[in-house]
Amino acid sequence: MLRSVILAAARSHRVERIVETAPVSRSIVRRFIAGEHVDDALQRTRELAADGLAVTIDYLGEDTTNPEQAETTRDEYIKLLDALHAAELTPAAEVSVKLSALGQVFDEKLAYENVRAICAKASEAGTTVTLDAEDHTTTDSTLDVLGRLRGEFPTTGAVLQAYLRRTEADCRELAVEGSRVRLCKGAYREPESVAYQGRLDVDKSYVRCLNVLMSGTGYPMVATHDPRLVAIGEDRAKWFERSPDEFEFQMLYGVRPDEQLRLAQAGYTVRVYLPYGTQWYPYMMRRLAERPANVGFLARALRSRG
Ligand SMILES: Cc1cc2nc3c(=O)[nH]c(=O)nc-3n(C[C@H](O)[C@H](O)[C@H](O)COP(=O)(O)OP(=O)(O)OC[C@H]3O[C@@H](n4cnc5c(N)ncnc54)[C@H](O)[C@@H]3O)c2cc1C
């Protein structure tokens, strides 16, 4: 219930204006987001790499409504990839991209051309791209774009959301040689017709999907902070005789940093999802929705403008 209310607020421009200008927002933004500029992302990447962590960088922004904005996002990624290459931070750092930020909502062909340019630059820089998963209305389009990109850039990664009823079948399709798949629970508000609603059902689906990915021939990316699922990930890797370079764990910047280090020190590859940019509002609201303990922040932000 609370999760639904926060996710609804994530789409409200009125609440966005209040939260963005509330003084209390600054500390929580600092916890989850690298900063506003490429240099901030580079600095955090250096720090994480020094701790033995890999990184995937996201330039914040989604649901772009015009071609100019989509091209600005594409150019920012190209600038970021040039900077990562020059700083010798590839291949440890790759990038995560939301197709809705590149025009998917109004022109799928434009989104494809934009993401193709980013993939070409990533390949030149010695790294790769993962396509983030957004709400279920975009899943078919995103997987279609993924399939086309893989023809030219075979290491392009997918994200599948365990809360969607379709995902076990998508895992079977994608658990193939050379295929990188990030499995997460899913962060959007989705109807019962397409998504499991209860936590237990989502967790059970996650385990079924993990079994498919771990028993296949692709490269699973186990994206969760859930201690039980991390333990099951470790267990399945042993069961299916995967060495630490045949799968990875992924977690969000600012969430369970001690666990990220513990897993890295135990010899696993751990990739941290590191967002930067000024468009942090929807991303941060999804993080708040995941953790009701963080909701006090939202109440303080709204009260400060009450
Ligand atoms: C690397 C990565 C990439 C992702 N990419 C996508 C994507 O492309 N599309 C998409 O829909 N979703 C994405 N997600 C988000 C994901 O779908 C979940 O919403 C999110 O990871 C929370 O689920 P969980 O598996 O961590 O389990 P949960 O059951 O939500 O959390 C388990 C435990 O982790 C801790 N925790 C979790 N979240 C937080 C938080 N925000 N603050 C503090 N503690 C927390 C708490 O201790 C909690 O009890 C991604 C997640 C990760 C880690």
Image (cartoon, rainbow, N blue to C red):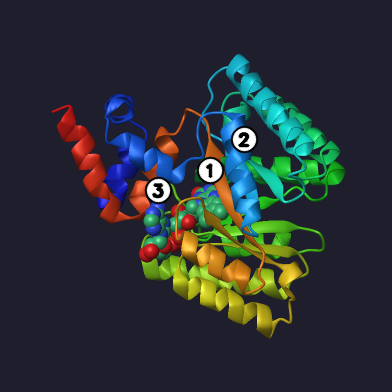
Circle 2: is it few (<14), some (14-19), or many (20+) Cα within 10 Å?
many
Indicate left or right for 227 with 170 as reference. Answer: left
Indicate left or right for 11 with 76 as reference. Answer: left
One can see residue 189 in this view:
no
Instruction: Point out residue 170 in the picture as x, y percentages from the top left corner.
Output: 64, 59
- Marks 3 and 2: which is nearer the front? 3
Q: Nearer the viewer, residue 132 or 246?
A: 246
Instruction: Point out residue 138 in the picture as x, y percentages from the top left corner.
Output: 57, 40
Q: Secondary structure at mark 3?
A: helix
Q: Amino acid at mark 3?
A: Arg
Give yes or no for contact between labels 2 and 1 (Cβ–Cβ under 8 Å).
yes
Q: CA distance from mark 3 to mark 2?
A: 20 Å
Q: Which residue carries the number 2 mark? A: 99
Q: Amino acid at mark 2?
A: Leu
Position of 23 relative to 136 (above/below): above
Q: Which residue carries the number 1 mark? A: 134
